[in-house]
Amino acid sequence: MWKSKKEKPNWIVVGEVICPWGNRGEIKIIPHTDFPERFQQMEAVRLFKKDAEEPVGLFPLESCREHKDGLLLKLSHVDSIDEAEKLRGMLIKVSVDELMPLPPGRYYIFQIIGLECQTVTGQRLGLVTEVLQTGANDVYVVKTYPGVSRQKEILIPVIPDVVKDIRPEEGVLIVHLLDGLLD
């Protein structure tokens, strides 16, 4: 059996640069956050290439405004279409310390992935490897430990009858299994 090595990520994606906008260096971004208003409060944004661990740079934010399904940002020292085009596809990330606080009982996805899933009776099922956002309710994908089930993964619906307790600080997710989930 393997154990979860639950580590906090260094950076969390909160937006993605889609394209340049206009001829003065603005960029259009799609927020990847439940709190798009955070961009109105930011003094600067950290831009990262897709798979980079470290930022390309910290860009002071001159302005931010809503536009249809995204936001338009004007960054200092990005003053032309060509300069803005170089930022296309980059990710805007914040440190874990800069995340917006969530109400009690709500968690960020990175806090759920890697938790050990256990039943209310203490049976260790496996590790949460993914969170599927279905619209109606989330679903936790649990990679099962050997011998737990014939299935390599079980899908745990995130509903009150099933998910009984989430304890990221202990690395544990407690569930009450519905009949047939382990078959």
Image (spheres, grey):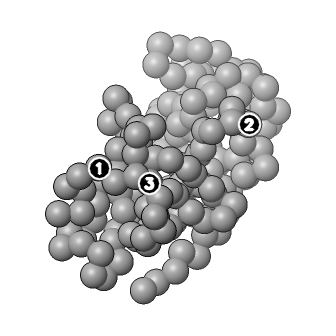
Residue position marked by numbered label 2 in the rendering: 101
Q: Position of residue 132 (x, y in %)?
A: 36, 46
Residue occupying the point 34% across, 68% down: 143
* Res 146 visible: yes
Say which quarter of the image contains residue 155: bottom left
Residue bearing mark 3: 175
Residue type, label 3: Val
Cα–Cα gap, marks 2 and 3: 25 Å
Give the structural element (helix, strand or loop) at label 3: strand
In the rendered image, residue 103, in percent from the top left (x then y), is placed at 69, 32
Label 2 SS:
loop
Disc 3 versus disc 1: distance between alpha carbons? 9 Å
Q: Amino acid at mark 1?
A: Leu
Q: Pointer 1: what residue?
A: 178
Q: Secondary structure at mark 1?
A: loop
Q: How many marks?
A: 3
Please state if 8 lies on the left or on the right of 85 as rendered: right
Q: Which of the marked residues, 1 or 2, is nearer the chain's N terminus?
A: 2
| Percent position of residue 133, x then y | 38, 39
Q: Residue 48 in the image: state x and y as whole percent.
A: 61, 53
- Give me the C-alpha separation between circle 1 and circle 2: 32 Å
Number of residues whose C-alpha sits closer than 10 Å to that of mark 2, classed few (under 14), some (14–19) or many (20 or more): few
Residue contact between numbered discs 1 and 2, judged by CB atoms under 8 Å: no
Pick the residue in front: 175 or 28.
Answer: 175
* Figure check: 121 above or below 92: below
- At label 2, the amino acid type is Pro
Q: Viewer-proximal residue, 143 or 89?
A: 143
Viewer-closest of 15 and 62: 15
Packing grade of label 3 (10 A; few <14, some 14-19, many >=20) is many
Mark 2 vs mark 3: in front:
3
- Along the polypeptide, which appears first: circle 2 or circle 3? 2
